[in-house]
Amino acid sequence: MRYTNTLPFFAALIIFFAPLAQAEPTYGERLGWKADDRVLILHNDDVGMSHESNLGTIEGFEQGLLTSCSTMMPCSWVLEWRDYMVDHPDIDNGLHLTLTSEWKQYRWRPVAGEPAVPGLIDDEGYMHRQVIQTIQNASADEIETEIRAQIALAEKMGLPITHLDSHMGTLFYSPEFFERYIKVGIEKQIPIMMVSGNDDDGGKTPAALQERVKAAAKIVWAGGLPVLDYLQTSTADTSDPKVMAETLIEHLRELKPGITQIILHGTRPGQNFGAISGSGGKREAELSMVLNAQVKKVIEEEGIILTTYRELMKRRQEVEN
C-alpha cells in the first residue's frame, strides 16, 4: 500500500505509532539481512558542486570504497557529472536537495526560479546562506516546489535518482519542511535518507524528539520506502589523512547490527577549490579514507557488508511490511 496524503495523515500516524514498544527488529533485518549483519553505505555528498567534488567522487567510486553519492542540482558542475553518469548509469546517485547557498563568492539560485519560490531568495538574488534564514523566509509550499523542480531537472537531464537527502540538513530542521520531504519521497517512490531513531546517543537527543523520529521512520516504511538504522554525519575534524583513516577504522569496528550510512565530502581539491571553501584539506582527507588499503582490510576483517540505496529499495519492494 502506498501513502501520499499530507499533514493530517502524517500527524495521525505519529500519534498512532509513538506509544509502540521498542523491542523491534532492525530495518536491516526487515530488509532480509541477518540479525547480526552490519550493513554500510559509504556516501559522498556535494556532487556537482564543483569540478573538484566530481573528481573526488569519481576517484572514490573507481579506486575506493564509495557506494553512493548525491548531486546538488542548482550547482554549476552538474553537467560534468551527468556526462560521467551516461557511461556509469549503475552508480548509486541521489539528489542532495539544495535549499541554501553558503559559500562567500560561489553561489547558486533555485531551480524553480525566483517568481515561484521568492522566499528562498536573499537580497543578493541567491539562496540564503544559512538554514535558519531559509526556515524563517520560505514556506513549506515553496520548499516542495523547489524539491519537485530539482527532481524534474534531474529527470530531464537523464540523471538516475536512487534516493533523496538534504544539503546542510535544511529539511530536517523544520517539521513542515520534513513533512514535504517525506511526502514527495513516498509519492514518487524515491527512497529518502531517513534514520530509525533507535540510536542511543547517551541522552543527547530529547526523548520526545527521538520518539517523533521513530514515528516518522515508521511512516516512511509504511509508505514503501527503506529506512536506515543509523547515520554518522561526521568524521574527524582534521586534514591529516592518517588521523582520518584511524577515525573511520574506529567507527567501522564499532558499527552496530543494522544499516549504517556514513556521510563524507570526499574531494580532490585543485587550484580553484580554495576560492570556494577553506575545507579542502579535510575533504581531501575524507577522500583518502575510502582509498585507504587498511580501511578496506578492516571492512573485510569485520565482515561489514557494503550496500547502496538501489539495493535497499530493491529489498524493500520484496517485503510486504
Image: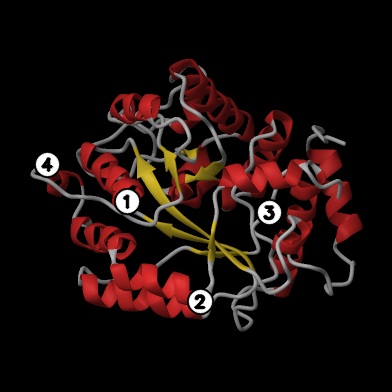
Query: How far is disc 2 from disc 4 in space, using C-alphas?
Result: 39 Å
Instruction: Name the colour scheme.
Output: secondary structure
Label 4, on which residue? 272
Residue type beneath disc 1: Gly
Residue type beneath disc 4: Asn
The x, y position of residue 267, in whole percent, is 25, 51
Label 3, on which residue? 227
The x, y position of residue 252, in whole percent, is 47, 74
Marks 3 and 4 close (CB-CB < 8 Å)? no
The residue located at (55%, 30%) in the rendering is 147
Labels 4, 1: front one: 1
Quadrant assignment for the N terminus: top right
The x, y position of residue 275, in whole percent, is 13, 45
Q: Which of the two labelled residues, at mark 3 and mark 2, occupies the earlier sequence position?
A: 3
Q: Pick the residue in front: 189 or 171.
A: 189
Marks 2 and 4 close (CB-CB < 8 Å)? no
Q: Pick the residue in front: 83 or 141.
A: 83
Labels 3, 4: front one: 3
